[in-house]
Image: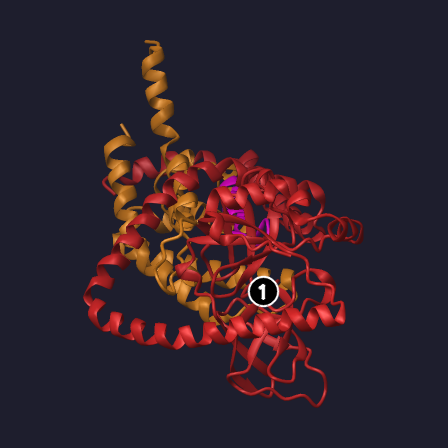
Chain colours: A red, B orange
Amino acid sequence: MNEGPQGFIRIAQPIKGLAQRFAYIGLIVAAFALMMLGKVDIVLVERARTTITDTVAPILDIVSAPVTSATAFIHRVEGLWGMHAENQILRENNERLMQWQALARKLEAENKALQKLLNYVPDLSVGYISARVIADTGGAFAHSLLLNAGKRDGVQKGQAAVTGEGLVGRIAGVGARSSRILLITDLNSRIPVVVGPNRTRAILTGDNSDRPRIIHLPPGETLSPGDEVTTSGHGGVLPVGLAVGVVATVNENGASVEPYVERDKLELIRVVDFGLSGILRKQVIEETPVSATYPEVQAVSEEKTGAGEVSSEQ
Amino acid sequence: MKPTFGQRLDTVTRNSLPVLLTLLLVLLNVIPLHIPGLSRVMPVLPLMAVYHWAIYRPQLMPPLAVFLIGACYDVLSGTPLGVNALVFLIVYGVVVFQQRFFVGKSFVVVWLGFGLMALGASVVSWILVSILAVAVVEPKAVFFQFILNFSFFPLLAWLFLYFQNAYLKLE
């Protein structure tokens, strides 16, 4: 700020030229045109988006890595403080969970026996693709993440993105080496869900707040806080039974849901391939073992996550 | 006297500094910081850069660059394409055409000016995104984002002024 007014007038002068003004107005019109094109959602716009995302993905990949490790380090140091108390809690939890595990084993065996009795056709097995979050596209207007895995890793549009806690969102765009997740809290997110012990069907819709809302409840159905929300699998886009969250508040306009997944803690995400992409493919899957249908997915998930993550037993 | 190749390269590099810095901010804006609650209200860093350079070095931040920076930000942040391209252009236009108002004013005036611009930018984005999504965007987060925009500005402005004084001095 140490220039005199002379300097300013000299640099401001060319901007006021007629040609500059026309260029400026032309660009304003172009911005509106972009909005229209984006709204119509033509292939060209989609391709431009993925090209730009793909180009910067390697840079974001490199830059975001140290930030992620730094955060992990801070968490570790924080963890040291409450370690003793936490150990105590974990030990108690462990004891309790052991009992649950025994129960689960018993139920699993029982379930298998009953399925055999009924000639039940099991759900399709899944393949996982693990990827790192390289961008959290901050802001009040869009809730999405970028991942460092794309088409070449087997990611496809529409697949579910999950963590151990539950559903994160859906793949909304795929480039060669990057992909975009539309979070369940985004304004454009619509997820078919079932709610509560009655398994009431509804739609979970984001509004860019951190609590998505439940809409399209069947008439006469009521919800109460604490009801579990899971995906319903209707529409064949997402698989059945992925945990989403719990109903937090209920009012006359609907209910809001507290998601299980905490957006700010997301570092690694698993993209789930449930093989729901079409009738043709489904037939193929039913006839052949999963490892034969998805060799590349299996390979990727094993390579990236270790064998423990893959649950592909029929 | 004709400048040598080295001198010309030096000038070009210096002159492209504002645009390059702003593009860098577009990238920095989307790095996941894992700070609870921040990502929803992350300030729009390139907006501050566009505002700053529109005041101090408008000839180094041409309208086309502003448009492209806005479009890049739209693509990376996932906002509807064109929204920030338009918002950045409006802020840029208002500042450049009201150059006289900003000339030689103290930092507080520039800061308050940015406050007004950021408020306008938030309102315009809110209206545009709501129209394009055919739904009302929750205004609370938008408001907090504006507050953060306003409070982050001095920090970035200080950084820009440093670059400006070090590399972009007017002769």
Vertical side of A61 occupied by A122: above or below: below
The amino acid type, in three-letter code, at marker 1 is: Leu
Q: Position of residue A303 (x, y in %)?
A: 49, 41
Tell whether B2 sits left or right of A220: left
Image quadrant containing the C terminus of chain A = bottom right
Q: Position of residue B151 (x, y in %)?
A: 31, 60
Vertical side of A114 occupied by A22: above or below: above
* Residue A295 magenta-highlighted: no
Residue visible at 31% across and 71% down? A90
Residue visible at 54% across and 42% down? A300
* Residue B82 magenta-highlighted: yes
In this view, the residue in front, A69 or A282, is A282
Residue A250, quarter of the rendered image = bottom right
Tell whether A294 sits left or right of A286: left
Vertical side of A216 occupied by A291: above or below: above
Residue A86, quarter of the rendered image = bottom left
- Kindly identify which residue carries mark 1: A187
In this rendering, does residue B71 appear at all? no
Vertical side of B15 occupied by A121: above or below: below
Residue bounds of the magenta highlight: B67-85
Q: Position of residue B87 (x, y in %)?
A: 51, 52
* Chain under disc 1: A
